[in-house]
Image (cartoon, rainbow, N blue to C red):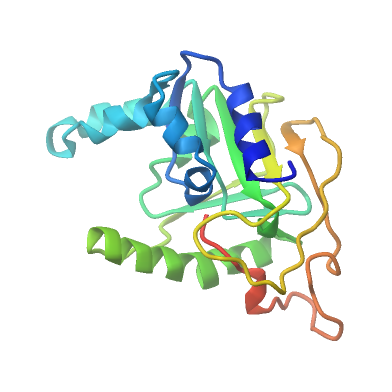
Amino acid sequence: MSDAAAARQAALDLLPDGAEVFTASSVTADAIGLTQEIDSSGRYTATRPMLMAMDPATQMGEMRRLGAAPQWVVGSVHALTHNGDLVIASASGSQLASMAYGAQNVLLIIGAQKIFPDLDTAMRRVHEYSLPLEDARARSAYGMSSTVHKVLTLHGDIEEGRVRVVLVDEPLGFDPPDPRRKTPPMTPPLIGQVALVAGARPSEAELGVEDGMPPGYFPEELFPEVT
């Protein structure tokens, strides 16, 4: 997709009116107005407002069940590799069960700056960039620190088309992008076990890796936002 507005519309076009939708915590989905539309418009059976109204002290079992198996889960990832591996890190794991298996449909909105060559560099992004920013956000918002207790890596799915990815040809999310960061171009849609609404597999040059850097090394500007 060319921009945030197009990505938002593509996501909404995929969600049937009245569908049960769980919005996993995602700054990317928040940034394009998708979370607000799902949770507040009345067009969908939104799971998150139900969860927020429940008492964890007395209803945790019901909360776990409600979040684990919705019709749709909508969110983002921390990184996407050239091979199509999707990496999602979490402190609690509250969104991982639905993405791994429980949800009938998974819809992920991903800014192009989250594309990395391999899982090693994807995990570096999780620990060296995303975690410090999320930790600062959690301390400010909740008065508590964050950590990476669980990491889900999706290599594909046994059910073709269950996982859908909307790639956006611009940086999206928590932190303003470094202007030196080169955004890779989008390619036509690819359909497979993970259905890409728009896909890209950029070269290292397109990712902004400078000549002479050792293999696997990525400068700070390649990590421009939290999920």
Q: Position of residue 176 (x, y in %)?
A: 56, 65
Q: Quadrant of residue 117?
A: bottom right
Q: Position of residue 171 (x, y in %)?
A: 64, 57
As drawn, the residue found furthest toward the bottom would be 212
Q: Quadrant of residue 12?
A: top right
Q: Position of residue 174 (x, y in %)?
A: 49, 59
Where 190 sits versus 182, above or below?
A: above
Residue 53 or 79: which is nearer the viewer? 53
As drawn, the residue found furthest toward the left would be 58
Residue 99 or 142: which is nearer the viewer? 142
Q: Position of residue 115 (x, y in %)?
A: 71, 57
The structure residue drawn at horizontal position 53% and vertical position 49%, both measured from the top left corner, is 28
Residue 101 or 30: which is nearer the viewer? 30
Q: Horizontally, is 9 left or right of 206 in the view?
A: left
Where 54 sits versus 138, above or below?
A: above
Residue 176 or 99: which is nearer the viewer? 176
The structure residue drawn at horizontal position 73% and vertical position 50%, both measured from the top left corner, is 169
The structure residue drawn at horizontal position 86% and vertical position 69%, both measured from the top left corner, is 205
* Residue 23 seen from this side: no
